[in-house]
Image (cartoon, rainbow, N blue to C red):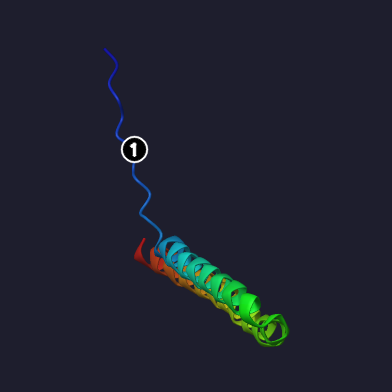
């Protein structure tokens, strides 16, 4: 009979969880923006093409903020692990 040796579980990284939440929210916002753009394009294509492209910058800035948050949270988590032992 084989005995299994219990292995230490890696603690769940907070930074990874935050990144997953932020990216899911950005994805939902992107889908909502796309659907509203498509609806506006059916009514007035010229106005939709003038209004909605600048709104896509908000999605890009959200991705940049999510990446920055991930890096900061990961650095803080590693620093805490290093100090605690």
Q: Is residue 3 above or below residue 60?
A: above
Residue at position x 62%, y 80% from top? 43
Quadrant of the image containing the C terminus:
bottom left
Q: Is residue 62 above or below residue 21?
A: below
Residue at position x 38%, y 49% from top? 10
Q: Which residue is mark 1?
A: 7
Direction from residue 47 to residue 77 in the image, left or right: left
User: Which of the 4 image quarters holds residue 14?
Assistant: bottom left
Residue 21 at x, y percent in the picture: 43, 66
Q: Residues within 10 Å of mark 1 (few under 14, many from 20)?
A: few
Helix, strand, or loop for circle 1? loop
Residue at position x 65%, y 77% from top? 41
Q: How many marks?
A: 1
Direction from residue 29 to residue 12 in the image, left or right: left
85 or 14: nearer the viewer: 14
Residue at position x 27%, y 21% from top? 3
Residue 79 at x, y percent in the picture: 45, 69
9 or 36: nearer the viewer: 36
Q: Residue furthest top?
A: 1
Residue 67 at x, y percent in the picture: 57, 71
Direction from residue 30 to residue 46 in the image, left or right: right
User: Which of the 4 image quarters holds residue 55?
Assistant: bottom right
53 or 11: nearer the viewer: 53
Residue 40 at x, y percent in the picture: 60, 79
Q: Is residue 28 above or below residue 13?
A: below
Q: Is residue 56 above or below residue 84?
A: below
Quadrant of the image containing the N terminus:
top left
Q: Residue furthest front?
A: 43
């Amino acid at each position: 009979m084989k005995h299994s040796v219990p292995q230490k579980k890696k603690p769940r990284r907070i930074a990874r969880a935050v990144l997953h939440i932020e990216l899911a929210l950005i994805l939902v916002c992107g889908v909502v923006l796309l659907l509203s753009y498509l609806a506006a394009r059916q009514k007035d294509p010229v106005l939709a093409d003038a209004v909605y492209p600048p709104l896509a910058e908000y999605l890009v800035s959200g991705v940049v903020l999510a990446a920055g948050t991930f890096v900061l949270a990961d650095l803080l988590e590693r620093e805490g692990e290093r100090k605690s032992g």
